[in-house]
Amino acid sequence: MKIGLCVIDMPASLGGGYVFRESLAQAALANPGRHTLDLVRARPRQPRYAESLGGSVGGAVARDGLASVLKPARLKSGLRQIAGRAKRFVAGRSVPGIDRELRSYVDWAIEQKLTWPNPDLMREFDEDISKKKFDLLWFNNIEPIHVGIPYIFNVFDLQHRLQPWFPEVSDKGQFRLREGSYAEALQRAAFVITSSEETRGQVGLFYGVPPDRIRVIPFPTPQPAVDAVASAETPKVSEADLRSKHGITGPYLFYPAQFWPHKNHINLLHGLKDLRDVHGLDFSMVFTGADHGNAAHVKAEARRLGLEHKVHFVGFVGYDEVAALYRHAFAMTYVTFFGPDNLPPLEAFALGCPVVLSDIPGIEKLYEDAVVPVNPRDGRSIADGVKKLVDDPAERERRVAKGRLIAERNSMSNYVVQMQALFDEFESVRRCWP
């Protein structure tokens, strides 16, 4: 079969999603098995409606051409009627009621699942796959679905259903956008791929996908971490360079996570305070990751807790520096509320860093006893988890050794082999039409 691996270009600052996509694409293209595999890239979508509506709606329409991204004629017609009234905008001041009316209309459009990416993107994407005449498409995250060709669909998580109170999965139309994407994409997929049994069950529960069409393939260890291990004898960033650059003193904990509320930096700070005040352990904390609107809140909490001199906000850094931070940390404290499907524990395993991890259902099957499970809602539990590693150095090393074995088992090549098995399985079905 001829298979199209479909990827939307995205910035490296988005973190795990970028690492997964790029590493997987490289590995799959290098080893397609019996099939022909070709990469299909699309440009990012235009700004989503709700994101464009932060200021004056009239200004947003003029700036971003909101009507142009609504493909169905019915939506265009409705927007034109409303936009016609917006001609009375003067010097950026809107007619009373226009903003509310247009916001309501866009919300309705999203609710009806009639929102579309940029038509130019869809046209470019459709033309590309039509010319190449693919038998099967492989989407490895939320992307436009070409329903005329069978496809495999990767699901990272369904947290908008499980924990909809987090703004990043519910606010500004996010819930509707996610729900609209998943509701159709999952039900039409030839196979749905999840990385854990927990997410597999959620796909069946929330969207009614038959169990035999949902397959579990655990996340692969990110290739940059594997490459960093291979070059461990000549690391590009030394511990001395790391500490000098960021002013890190003493033992430190590491948390590589974008600044989203669900990443739970706040309770981790309370855990850091309990390590100091309850256990008498003086740790520093290093946060990496891009700010998605929550960094100021986290910094304010660090000041309130008297930890501003112990917490280092280093921003988005290159992978050589990330690898060094893993190597020299006392532990990675990955206390996210979302999971169990996460990539950083595998990175930490590969690079020999102990892992303190949120006790989310499913982690025991994915990571066995290589991690220290903690309650992410409780700072004292997080502190106690770190103290376990302090009190028993031999147990810390045992967990590190176990983690390395898991990272090796979850290789990128093993992931690709399991995907090839799905291609082979579907081949006898696809041959039934031209």
Image: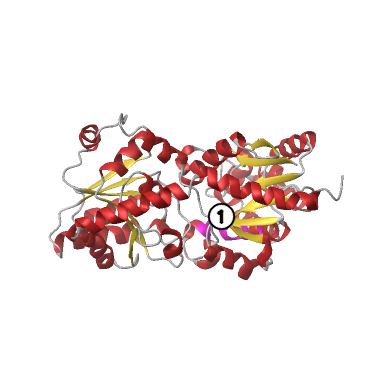
Main secondary structure along the magenta-highlighted residues = helix
Q: Nearer the viewer, residue 109 or 45?
A: 45
| Quarter-of-image position of residue 91 | top right
Q: Mark 1 points at which residue?
A: 217
| Quarter-of-image position of residue 96 | bottom right
> Which percent across, then down, holds residue 36?
71, 36
Q: Is residue 421 left or right of residue 368?
A: right
> Which percent across, then down, holds residue 337?
41, 62
Magenta stretch holds residue 177? yes
Badge 1: how crowded within 10 Å, few (<14), some, or many (20+)?
A: some
> Which percent across, then down, holds residue 305?
21, 58
Q: What residue type is labelled 1?
A: Ile
Q: Quadrant of the C terminus?
A: top right
Q: Nearer the viewer, residue 291 or 300?
A: 291
Where 147 sits versus 41, above or below? below
| Quarter-of-image position of residue 249 | top left
Q: Quadrant of the N terminus?
A: top right
Where 217 sits versus 238, above or below? below
What is the basis of the colouring in this image? secondary structure
Question: Which residue extends farthest left?
Answer: 280
Q: Which of 209 and 434 is in front in this view?
A: 434
Where 151 sits versus 383, above or below? above
Residue range highlighted in magenta: 169-180
Q: Nearer the viewer, residue 223 or 42?
A: 223
Q: Can residue 22 be seen in this view?
A: yes
Q: Is residue 48 visible?
A: no
- Numbered label tally: 1
Magenta stretch holds residue 392? no
Question: Which residue extends farthest bottom?
Answer: 205
Secondary structure found at label 1: loop
Q: Is residue 70 left or right of residue 169?
A: right
Where 58 sits versus 39, above or below? below
